[in-house]
Amino acid sequence: SEVEGWIWGRRLGVITRSASSAAHQKVCVVGGGPAGFYTAQHLLKDVQVDIYERLPVPFGLVRFGVAPDHPEVKNVISTFTQTAHHARCCYYGNVNVGTDVSVEELREAYHAVVLSYGAEGNRSMGVPGEDLEGVYPAKDFVGWYNGLPSNRELNPGLDCETAVILGQGNVALDVARILLSPIDELKKTDITQRSLDALAQSQVRRVLIVGRRGPLQIAGTIKELREMVNLPDTKPEMVASEFEGMAEALKVIPRPRKRLTELMLKTAVDPPAEKERQRRQAASRSWGLRFLRSPLEVLAGPDGARVAGIRLAVNRLEGTGDGSVAVPTGEVETMDCGLVITSIGYKSLPIDPAVPFDPRKAIVPNSLGRVQQAAGLYCSGWLKTGPVGVIATTMNNSFDTAHSVVEDLTSGCLDATSAKPGSTGIGPLLDKRGVKPVSFSDWEKINQEERRRGAAQGKPREKLLDVEEMLKTWTV
Protein backbone atom coordinates (compact mmCIF):
# COMPACT_ATOMS: atom_id res chain seq x y z
CA SER A 1 0.00 0.00 0.00
CA GLU A 2 1.00 3.67 -0.22
CA VAL A 3 1.34 3.81 3.58
CA GLU A 4 3.59 0.71 3.62
CA GLY A 5 5.76 2.27 0.93
CA TRP A 6 6.03 5.54 2.85
CA ILE A 7 7.06 3.75 6.06
CA TRP A 8 9.63 1.61 4.22
CA GLY A 9 11.10 4.67 2.52
CA ARG A 10 11.38 6.60 5.78
CA ARG A 11 13.06 3.64 7.49
CA LEU A 12 15.88 3.68 4.91
CA GLY A 13 16.15 7.44 4.88
CA VAL A 14 14.48 7.95 1.49
CA ILE A 15 13.50 11.50 0.69
CA THR A 16 9.96 11.24 -0.69
CA ARG A 17 8.87 14.00 -3.03
CA SER A 18 5.65 15.12 -4.60
CA ALA A 19 5.01 14.57 -8.29
CA SER A 20 5.43 18.30 -8.85
CA SER A 21 9.00 18.31 -7.51
CA ALA A 22 12.05 18.39 -9.74
CA ALA A 23 12.85 14.79 -8.88
CA HIS A 24 9.54 13.16 -9.81
CA GLN A 25 11.24 11.23 -12.61
CA LYS A 26 12.65 8.08 -11.06
CA VAL A 27 15.41 5.92 -12.49
CA CYS A 28 16.70 2.67 -11.04
CA VAL A 29 20.31 1.53 -11.46
CA VAL A 30 21.02 -2.17 -10.91
CA GLY A 31 24.60 -2.66 -9.70
CA GLY A 32 26.65 -0.70 -7.18
CA GLY A 33 30.01 -0.96 -8.92
CA PRO A 34 31.85 1.70 -10.97
CA ALA A 35 29.40 1.56 -13.90
CA GLY A 36 26.41 1.89 -11.58
CA PHE A 37 27.81 4.81 -9.63
CA TYR A 38 29.05 6.68 -12.69
CA THR A 39 25.66 6.21 -14.35
CA ALA A 40 23.93 7.49 -11.22
CA GLN A 41 26.33 10.44 -10.93
CA HIS A 42 25.40 11.67 -14.39
CA LEU A 43 21.67 10.99 -13.99
CA LEU A 44 21.41 12.88 -10.70
CA LYS A 45 21.69 16.16 -12.56
CA ASP A 46 18.16 15.53 -13.84
CA VAL A 47 16.31 12.77 -11.98
CA GLN A 48 16.01 10.80 -8.75
CA VAL A 49 18.14 7.63 -8.72
CA ASP A 50 17.93 4.47 -6.65
CA ILE A 51 20.88 2.05 -6.77
CA TYR A 52 20.25 -1.64 -6.06
CA GLU A 53 23.24 -3.86 -5.26
CA ARG A 54 23.29 -7.62 -4.64
CA LEU A 55 25.85 -7.40 -1.80
CA PRO A 56 25.43 -5.30 1.34
CA VAL A 57 28.67 -3.45 0.48
CA PRO A 58 29.08 -1.13 -2.53
CA PHE A 59 31.77 -0.36 -5.14
CA GLY A 60 32.00 -3.68 -7.00
CA LEU A 61 35.34 -4.24 -8.71
CA VAL A 62 36.89 -1.21 -7.03
CA ARG A 63 36.55 -3.09 -3.75
CA PHE A 64 36.88 -6.66 -5.03
CA GLY A 65 38.98 -6.35 -8.20
CA VAL A 66 41.63 -3.67 -7.68
CA ALA A 67 44.89 -5.10 -6.34
CA PRO A 68 45.36 -4.43 -2.60
CA ASP A 69 48.77 -2.82 -3.26
CA HIS A 70 47.13 -0.27 -5.61
CA PRO A 71 45.22 1.85 -3.07
CA GLU A 72 45.45 4.95 -5.27
CA VAL A 73 43.09 3.34 -7.79
CA LYS A 74 40.46 3.13 -5.04
CA ASN A 75 40.39 6.90 -4.62
CA VAL A 76 37.30 6.93 -6.86
CA ILE A 77 35.40 5.62 -3.82
CA SER A 78 35.31 9.19 -2.47
CA THR A 79 33.51 10.30 -5.65
CA PHE A 80 31.08 7.40 -5.40
CA THR A 81 30.42 8.27 -1.75
CA GLN A 82 29.55 11.85 -2.74
CA THR A 83 27.12 10.43 -5.30
CA ALA A 84 25.50 8.18 -2.68
CA HIS A 85 25.08 11.18 -0.34
CA HIS A 86 23.30 13.23 -3.01
CA ALA A 87 19.82 14.28 -1.86
CA ARG A 88 18.21 12.53 -4.83
CA CYS A 89 20.18 9.26 -4.55
CA CYS A 90 19.43 6.20 -2.42
CA TYR A 91 21.44 3.00 -2.15
CA TYR A 92 19.80 -0.36 -1.41
CA GLY A 93 22.34 -3.10 -0.78
CA ASN A 94 21.57 -6.77 -0.15
CA VAL A 95 18.94 -6.76 -2.92
CA ASN A 96 19.45 -9.44 -5.57
CA VAL A 97 17.65 -8.25 -8.68
CA GLY A 98 16.36 -11.24 -10.64
CA THR A 99 15.79 -13.17 -7.41
CA ASP A 100 14.48 -10.82 -4.70
CA VAL A 101 12.75 -8.58 -7.20
CA SER A 102 12.28 -8.98 -10.95
CA VAL A 103 13.36 -6.56 -13.63
CA GLU A 104 9.71 -6.29 -14.73
CA GLU A 105 8.73 -5.18 -11.21
CA LEU A 106 11.44 -2.53 -11.35
CA ARG A 107 10.22 -1.37 -14.75
CA GLU A 108 6.72 -0.97 -13.32
CA ALA A 109 8.05 1.14 -10.44
CA TYR A 110 10.49 3.39 -12.34
CA HIS A 111 10.45 5.53 -15.45
CA ALA A 112 13.69 3.86 -16.56
CA VAL A 113 15.88 0.97 -15.41
CA VAL A 114 19.63 0.82 -16.09
CA LEU A 115 21.37 -2.55 -15.75
CA SER A 116 24.98 -2.05 -14.61
CA TYR A 117 25.73 -5.26 -12.78
CA GLY A 118 29.02 -6.01 -14.53
CA ALA A 119 30.62 -9.32 -15.42
CA GLU A 120 30.43 -11.99 -12.72
CA GLY A 121 31.15 -15.01 -14.87
CA ASN A 122 34.44 -16.61 -15.91
CA ARG A 123 35.39 -17.49 -19.46
CA SER A 124 36.24 -21.14 -19.89
CA MET A 125 39.39 -22.43 -21.60
CA GLY A 126 37.42 -25.31 -23.07
CA VAL A 127 40.26 -27.82 -22.66
CA PRO A 128 40.50 -31.16 -20.85
CA GLY A 129 41.62 -30.96 -17.24
CA GLU A 130 40.53 -27.41 -16.49
CA ASP A 131 38.36 -28.73 -13.63
CA LEU A 132 41.33 -30.30 -11.84
CA GLU A 133 42.20 -29.22 -8.31
CA GLY A 134 44.71 -26.38 -8.51
CA VAL A 135 43.13 -24.66 -11.54
CA TYR A 136 41.42 -21.36 -10.72
CA PRO A 137 39.90 -18.52 -12.73
CA ALA A 138 41.76 -15.28 -12.02
CA LYS A 139 38.47 -13.63 -11.04
CA ASP A 140 38.02 -16.16 -8.21
CA PHE A 141 41.66 -15.91 -7.11
CA VAL A 142 41.44 -12.11 -7.05
CA GLY A 143 38.12 -12.35 -5.18
CA TRP A 144 39.81 -14.62 -2.64
CA TYR A 145 42.58 -12.19 -1.70
CA ASN A 146 40.26 -9.17 -1.97
CA GLY A 147 37.53 -10.54 0.30
CA LEU A 148 34.67 -11.32 -2.09
CA PRO A 149 32.23 -13.34 0.07
CA SER A 150 31.60 -15.97 -2.61
CA ASN A 151 35.35 -16.71 -2.82
CA ARG A 152 36.25 -16.68 0.87
CA GLU A 153 36.50 -20.48 1.04
CA LEU A 154 38.63 -20.86 -2.10
CA ASN A 155 41.73 -22.10 -0.23
CA PRO A 156 44.04 -22.28 -3.29
CA GLY A 157 46.87 -24.77 -3.17
CA LEU A 158 50.11 -22.79 -2.88
CA ASP A 159 52.30 -25.76 -1.94
CA CYS A 160 54.04 -25.94 -5.32
CA GLU A 161 57.09 -24.26 -6.80
CA THR A 162 55.75 -23.13 -10.19
CA ALA A 163 52.50 -21.35 -11.06
CA VAL A 164 51.33 -20.73 -14.63
CA ILE A 165 49.04 -17.81 -15.41
CA LEU A 166 47.25 -17.93 -18.75
CA GLY A 167 46.69 -14.43 -20.10
CA GLN A 168 48.88 -11.33 -20.17
CA GLY A 169 46.57 -8.49 -19.15
CA ASN A 170 46.79 -6.36 -16.02
CA VAL A 171 44.80 -8.88 -13.96
CA ALA A 172 47.36 -11.58 -14.82
CA LEU A 173 50.20 -9.24 -13.81
CA ASP A 174 48.37 -8.35 -10.58
CA VAL A 175 48.00 -12.02 -9.67
CA ALA A 176 51.67 -12.73 -10.44
CA ARG A 177 52.75 -9.79 -8.32
CA ILE A 178 50.60 -10.82 -5.35
CA LEU A 179 51.95 -14.38 -5.55
CA LEU A 180 55.56 -13.14 -5.44
CA SER A 181 55.32 -9.98 -3.29
CA PRO A 182 57.15 -9.86 0.06
CA ILE A 183 54.70 -10.53 2.87
CA ASP A 184 55.91 -7.46 4.77
CA GLU A 185 54.71 -5.29 1.87
CA LEU A 186 51.33 -7.00 1.64
CA LYS A 187 50.80 -6.57 5.39
CA LYS A 188 50.43 -2.83 4.78
CA THR A 189 47.46 -3.30 2.43
CA ASP A 190 43.80 -4.26 2.83
CA ILE A 191 44.41 -7.82 1.62
CA THR A 192 42.37 -10.20 3.76
CA GLN A 193 44.16 -11.73 6.72
CA ARG A 194 43.11 -15.21 5.63
CA SER A 195 44.84 -14.71 2.26
CA LEU A 196 47.86 -13.08 3.87
CA ASP A 197 48.33 -16.09 6.14
CA ALA A 198 48.12 -18.47 3.17
CA LEU A 199 50.57 -16.41 1.08
CA ALA A 200 52.99 -16.32 4.01
CA GLN A 201 53.12 -20.13 3.83
CA SER A 202 53.22 -20.24 0.01
CA GLN A 203 55.86 -22.40 -1.67
CA VAL A 204 55.43 -20.66 -5.05
CA ARG A 205 58.81 -19.37 -6.20
CA ARG A 206 58.32 -19.15 -9.96
CA VAL A 207 55.46 -17.64 -11.98
CA LEU A 208 55.17 -17.92 -15.77
CA ILE A 209 52.71 -15.57 -17.51
CA VAL A 210 51.66 -17.13 -20.81
CA GLY A 211 50.03 -15.46 -23.83
CA ARG A 212 48.73 -16.86 -27.11
CA ARG A 213 50.19 -14.02 -29.18
CA GLY A 214 53.51 -12.14 -29.20
CA PRO A 215 55.21 -9.32 -27.27
CA LEU A 216 53.57 -6.66 -29.44
CA GLN A 217 50.12 -7.87 -28.41
CA ILE A 218 50.57 -8.08 -24.65
CA ALA A 219 47.47 -6.61 -22.99
CA GLY A 220 49.12 -5.38 -19.78
CA THR A 221 50.24 -1.79 -19.33
CA ILE A 222 53.69 -0.39 -18.63
CA LYS A 223 52.90 0.47 -14.99
CA GLU A 224 52.06 -3.12 -14.10
CA LEU A 225 55.00 -4.52 -16.06
CA ARG A 226 57.41 -2.08 -14.41
CA GLU A 227 56.13 -3.24 -11.01
CA MET A 228 57.05 -6.81 -11.95
CA VAL A 229 60.50 -5.76 -13.15
CA ASN A 230 61.16 -3.92 -9.87
CA LEU A 231 59.51 -6.43 -7.52
CA PRO A 232 61.84 -7.08 -4.55
CA ASP A 233 63.56 -10.47 -4.27
CA THR A 234 62.56 -11.50 -7.81
CA LYS A 235 64.33 -11.79 -11.13
CA PRO A 236 62.96 -11.93 -14.69
CA GLU A 237 63.12 -15.24 -16.50
CA MET A 238 62.62 -14.38 -20.17
CA VAL A 239 63.44 -16.14 -23.45
CA ALA A 240 65.50 -13.71 -25.55
CA SER A 241 64.67 -15.48 -28.81
CA GLU A 242 61.00 -14.58 -28.38
CA PHE A 243 61.94 -10.93 -28.91
CA GLU A 244 63.69 -11.31 -32.24
CA GLY A 245 62.71 -8.51 -34.62
CA MET A 246 61.27 -6.37 -31.84
CA ALA A 247 63.98 -3.70 -32.08
CA GLU A 248 63.03 -3.12 -35.72
CA ALA A 249 59.32 -3.04 -34.85
CA LEU A 250 59.93 -0.22 -32.36
CA LYS A 251 60.38 2.20 -35.25
CA VAL A 252 56.72 2.05 -36.32
CA ILE A 253 54.59 1.20 -33.26
CA PRO A 254 52.64 3.91 -31.32
CA ARG A 255 54.26 5.53 -28.30
CA PRO A 256 52.45 3.73 -25.40
CA ARG A 257 53.10 0.35 -27.02
CA LYS A 258 56.65 1.43 -27.86
CA ARG A 259 57.51 2.24 -24.23
CA LEU A 260 56.05 -1.06 -23.05
CA THR A 261 58.01 -3.02 -25.69
CA GLU A 262 61.21 -1.15 -24.85
CA LEU A 263 60.84 -2.18 -21.21
CA MET A 264 60.31 -5.84 -22.18
CA LEU A 265 63.32 -5.75 -24.51
CA LYS A 266 65.54 -4.15 -21.89
CA THR A 267 64.45 -6.74 -19.32
CA ALA A 268 64.78 -9.75 -21.62
CA VAL A 269 67.75 -8.94 -23.84
CA ASP A 270 69.96 -6.16 -22.47
CA PRO A 271 72.76 -7.12 -20.05
CA PRO A 272 71.79 -5.70 -16.62
CA ALA A 273 73.84 -3.01 -14.92
CA GLU A 274 75.99 -4.16 -12.00
CA LYS A 275 73.52 -3.22 -9.28
CA GLU A 276 70.67 -4.94 -11.12
CA ARG A 277 72.86 -7.97 -11.81
CA GLN A 278 73.59 -8.34 -8.11
CA ARG A 279 69.93 -7.91 -7.26
CA ARG A 280 68.96 -10.68 -9.66
CA GLN A 281 71.65 -12.99 -8.34
CA ALA A 282 70.36 -12.60 -4.80
CA ALA A 283 66.68 -13.10 -5.74
CA SER A 284 64.92 -16.21 -4.44
CA ARG A 285 61.94 -15.97 -6.77
CA SER A 286 61.42 -15.51 -10.51
CA TRP A 287 58.79 -14.56 -13.05
CA GLY A 288 58.69 -14.68 -16.81
CA LEU A 289 56.59 -13.91 -19.86
CA ARG A 290 56.03 -16.68 -22.39
CA PHE A 291 54.56 -15.88 -25.79
CA LEU A 292 52.85 -17.71 -28.66
CA ARG A 293 51.41 -20.45 -26.45
CA SER A 294 47.80 -21.63 -26.13
CA PRO A 295 46.46 -24.22 -23.66
CA LEU A 296 45.61 -27.66 -25.03
CA GLU A 297 45.24 -29.67 -21.83
CA VAL A 298 45.78 -29.36 -18.09
CA LEU A 299 47.69 -32.42 -16.93
CA ALA A 300 46.96 -34.32 -13.73
CA GLY A 301 49.51 -35.73 -11.34
CA PRO A 302 49.71 -39.37 -10.20
CA ASP A 303 46.57 -39.00 -8.06
CA GLY A 304 44.53 -37.99 -11.12
CA ALA A 305 42.98 -35.11 -9.19
CA ARG A 306 45.58 -32.37 -8.82
CA VAL A 307 47.22 -30.35 -11.61
CA ALA A 308 50.84 -31.26 -12.34
CA GLY A 309 51.43 -29.50 -15.66
CA ILE A 310 49.93 -27.95 -18.74
CA ARG A 311 50.28 -28.88 -22.41
CA LEU A 312 50.51 -25.89 -24.75
CA ALA A 313 50.25 -25.42 -28.49
CA VAL A 314 53.10 -23.40 -29.98
CA ASN A 315 51.69 -20.69 -32.24
CA ARG A 316 52.79 -18.40 -35.01
CA LEU A 317 51.21 -15.06 -35.88
CA GLU A 318 49.29 -14.24 -39.04
CA GLY A 319 48.74 -10.55 -39.67
CA THR A 320 50.26 -7.59 -37.84
CA GLY A 321 49.64 -5.49 -34.75
CA ASP A 322 46.48 -5.88 -32.71
CA GLY A 323 44.78 -7.56 -35.66
CA SER A 324 47.19 -10.48 -35.72
CA VAL A 325 45.84 -13.99 -35.16
CA ALA A 326 47.58 -16.86 -33.35
CA VAL A 327 47.71 -20.02 -35.49
CA PRO A 328 48.97 -23.38 -34.14
CA THR A 329 52.19 -24.63 -35.74
CA GLY A 330 51.59 -28.25 -34.77
CA GLU A 331 54.39 -28.12 -32.23
CA VAL A 332 53.46 -28.88 -28.60
CA GLU A 333 55.19 -27.95 -25.35
CA THR A 334 54.63 -29.04 -21.75
CA MET A 335 55.20 -26.95 -18.62
CA ASP A 336 55.39 -28.54 -15.17
CA CYS A 337 53.39 -26.61 -12.57
CA GLY A 338 51.23 -27.16 -9.51
CA LEU A 339 48.98 -24.13 -9.93
CA VAL A 340 47.18 -22.79 -13.02
CA ILE A 341 45.32 -19.47 -13.00
CA THR A 342 43.28 -18.56 -16.05
CA SER A 343 43.14 -14.84 -16.74
CA ILE A 344 41.36 -15.02 -20.08
CA GLY A 345 38.49 -12.65 -19.37
CA TYR A 346 35.33 -12.08 -17.39
CA LYS A 347 31.86 -12.37 -18.87
CA SER A 348 28.42 -11.06 -17.97
CA LEU A 349 25.60 -13.44 -17.11
CA PRO A 350 21.86 -13.12 -17.77
CA ILE A 351 20.05 -11.65 -14.77
CA ASP A 352 16.39 -12.17 -15.65
CA PRO A 353 14.56 -14.07 -18.42
CA ALA A 354 12.77 -10.82 -19.33
CA VAL A 355 16.05 -9.14 -20.34
CA PRO A 356 17.47 -9.77 -23.84
CA PHE A 357 20.91 -11.38 -23.68
CA ASP A 358 23.50 -12.34 -26.30
CA PRO A 359 25.17 -15.51 -24.94
CA ARG A 360 27.92 -15.46 -27.58
CA LYS A 361 29.09 -11.91 -26.83
CA ALA A 362 27.92 -12.18 -23.18
CA ILE A 363 26.32 -8.73 -23.30
CA VAL A 364 22.83 -7.23 -23.36
CA PRO A 365 22.21 -6.19 -27.00
CA ASN A 366 21.99 -2.41 -27.06
CA SER A 367 22.38 0.77 -29.05
CA LEU A 368 24.12 3.55 -27.10
CA GLY A 369 22.98 1.80 -23.92
CA ARG A 370 19.35 1.42 -25.03
CA VAL A 371 18.40 -2.25 -24.70
CA GLN A 372 17.02 -3.50 -27.98
CA GLN A 373 13.25 -4.04 -28.12
CA ALA A 374 12.78 -2.97 -24.49
CA ALA A 375 11.75 0.69 -24.13
CA GLY A 376 12.80 2.14 -20.77
CA LEU A 377 15.50 -0.49 -20.21
CA TYR A 378 19.18 0.45 -20.52
CA CYS A 379 22.62 -0.98 -19.75
CA SER A 380 26.05 0.41 -18.97
CA GLY A 381 29.53 -0.82 -18.11
CA TRP A 382 30.81 -4.28 -19.04
CA LEU A 383 27.27 -5.58 -19.47
CA LYS A 384 27.00 -3.10 -22.34
CA THR A 385 30.42 -3.49 -23.97
CA GLY A 386 32.02 -6.64 -22.64
CA PRO A 387 34.97 -6.56 -20.17
CA VAL A 388 37.15 -3.93 -21.80
CA GLY A 389 39.06 -0.86 -20.68
CA VAL A 390 39.89 0.66 -17.31
CA ILE A 391 37.82 2.66 -14.82
CA ALA A 392 38.02 5.80 -16.97
CA THR A 393 36.61 3.80 -19.90
CA THR A 394 33.73 2.65 -17.72
CA MET A 395 33.08 6.23 -16.62
CA ASN A 396 32.70 7.52 -20.18
CA ASN A 397 30.67 4.49 -21.18
CA SER A 398 28.29 5.07 -18.24
CA PHE A 399 27.93 8.78 -18.92
CA ASP A 400 26.93 7.91 -22.49
CA THR A 401 24.18 5.58 -21.26
CA ALA A 402 22.95 8.20 -18.77
CA HIS A 403 22.79 10.71 -21.62
CA SER A 404 20.59 8.29 -23.59
CA VAL A 405 18.24 7.94 -20.60
CA VAL A 406 17.89 11.70 -20.12
CA GLU A 407 17.47 12.25 -23.84
CA ASP A 408 14.61 9.72 -23.95
CA LEU A 409 12.94 11.22 -20.87
CA THR A 410 13.06 14.75 -22.25
CA SER A 411 12.21 13.93 -25.88
CA GLY A 412 9.04 12.03 -25.09
CA CYS A 413 10.40 8.63 -26.13
CA LEU A 414 9.55 7.59 -22.58
CA ASP A 415 6.42 8.65 -20.72
CA ALA A 416 7.96 10.83 -18.02
CA THR A 417 4.69 12.52 -17.00
CA SER A 418 3.02 9.61 -15.22
CA ALA A 419 3.76 9.18 -11.54
CA LYS A 420 5.91 6.19 -10.60
CA PRO A 421 6.32 4.88 -7.04
CA GLY A 422 10.04 4.10 -7.27
CA SER A 423 11.45 2.57 -4.10
CA THR A 424 8.19 3.04 -2.21
CA GLY A 425 6.66 0.52 -4.58
CA ILE A 426 9.55 -1.93 -4.33
CA GLY A 427 10.01 -1.73 -0.54
CA PRO A 428 6.82 -3.57 0.44
CA LEU A 429 7.61 -6.33 -2.08
CA LEU A 430 11.02 -6.86 -0.45
CA ASP A 431 9.46 -6.78 3.02
CA LYS A 432 7.02 -9.54 2.11
CA ARG A 433 9.89 -11.60 0.67
CA GLY A 434 11.99 -11.26 3.81
CA VAL A 435 14.68 -9.09 2.21
CA LYS A 436 16.39 -6.52 4.44
CA PRO A 437 17.98 -3.80 2.30
CA VAL A 438 21.16 -2.10 3.49
CA SER A 439 21.22 1.70 3.16
CA PHE A 440 24.39 3.68 2.48
CA SER A 441 24.50 4.84 6.10
CA ASP A 442 24.31 1.16 7.10
CA TRP A 443 27.29 0.48 4.79
CA GLU A 444 29.18 3.27 6.55
CA LYS A 445 28.77 1.39 9.83
CA ILE A 446 30.24 -1.71 8.15
CA ASN A 447 33.03 0.50 6.79
CA GLN A 448 33.82 1.81 10.27
CA GLU A 449 33.99 -1.72 11.66
CA GLU A 450 36.32 -2.87 8.87
CA ARG A 451 38.60 0.10 9.48
CA ARG A 452 38.59 -0.58 13.24
CA ARG A 453 39.59 -4.22 12.69
CA GLY A 454 42.26 -3.18 10.20
CA ALA A 455 43.76 -0.60 12.56
CA ALA A 456 44.10 -3.28 15.22
CA GLN A 457 46.37 -5.18 12.80
CA GLY A 458 48.22 -2.18 11.38
CA LYS A 459 46.25 -2.32 8.10
CA PRO A 460 43.93 0.21 6.42
CA ARG A 461 41.02 -2.22 6.81
CA GLU A 462 40.15 -5.84 7.45
CA LYS A 463 37.21 -6.72 5.22
CA LEU A 464 34.26 -8.68 6.51
CA LEU A 465 34.01 -11.84 4.42
CA ASP A 466 30.56 -13.10 5.35
CA VAL A 467 27.29 -11.47 4.27
CA GLU A 468 25.52 -12.45 7.49
CA GLU A 469 28.30 -10.82 9.51
CA MET A 470 27.98 -7.67 7.40
CA LEU A 471 24.24 -7.54 8.13
CA LYS A 472 24.78 -8.04 11.87
CA THR A 473 27.39 -5.29 11.99
CA TRP A 474 25.00 -2.46 11.10
CA THR A 475 22.05 -3.78 13.11
CA VAL A 476 24.00 -4.03 16.39
Image: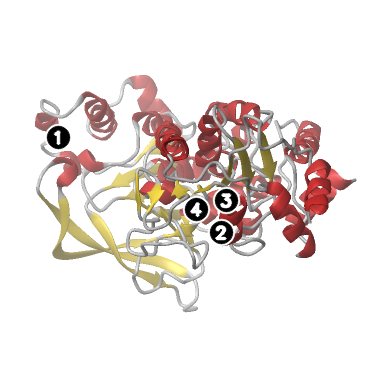
Provide residue 108's location: percent of width, then percent of height: 59, 56
* x 43%, y 51%: residue: 383
Q: Nearer the viewer, mark 2 or mark 4?
A: 2
Can you tell which mark lies on residue 246? 1
Provide residue 166's location: percent of width, then percent of height: 36, 54
Tell me which label, 3 or 1, sits earlier in the chain: 3
Asked if residue 137 is positioned above or below residue 476 in the image, the reply reads below
Name the amino acid type tagged 3: Gly
Q: Which residue is mark 4?
A: 139
How many numbered circles does the render carry? 4
Name the amino acid type tagged 4: Lys
Q: Quadrant of the N terminus?
A: bottom right
Please indicate whether residue 326 sits to the left or right of residue 184 in the image: left
Please indicate whether residue 7 sits to the left or right of residue 183 in the image: right
Q: CA distance from mark 3 to mark 1?
A: 36 Å
Tell me which label, 4 or 1, sits earlier in the chain: 4
Name the amino acid type tagged 1: Met
* x 15%, y 48%: residue: 324
- Residues marked 4 and 3 touching at CB (< 8 Å): yes
Rendering quarter of residue 78: top right
Classify mark 3: residues with Cα within 10 Å, few (<14), some (14-19) or many (20+).
many
Tell me which label, 2 or 4, sits earlier in the chain: 2
- Residues marked 2 and 3 touching at CB (< 8 Å): no
Asked if residue 80 is positioned above or below residue 434 in the image, the reply reads above
Classify mark 2: residues with Cα within 10 Å, few (<14), some (14-19) or many (20+).
many
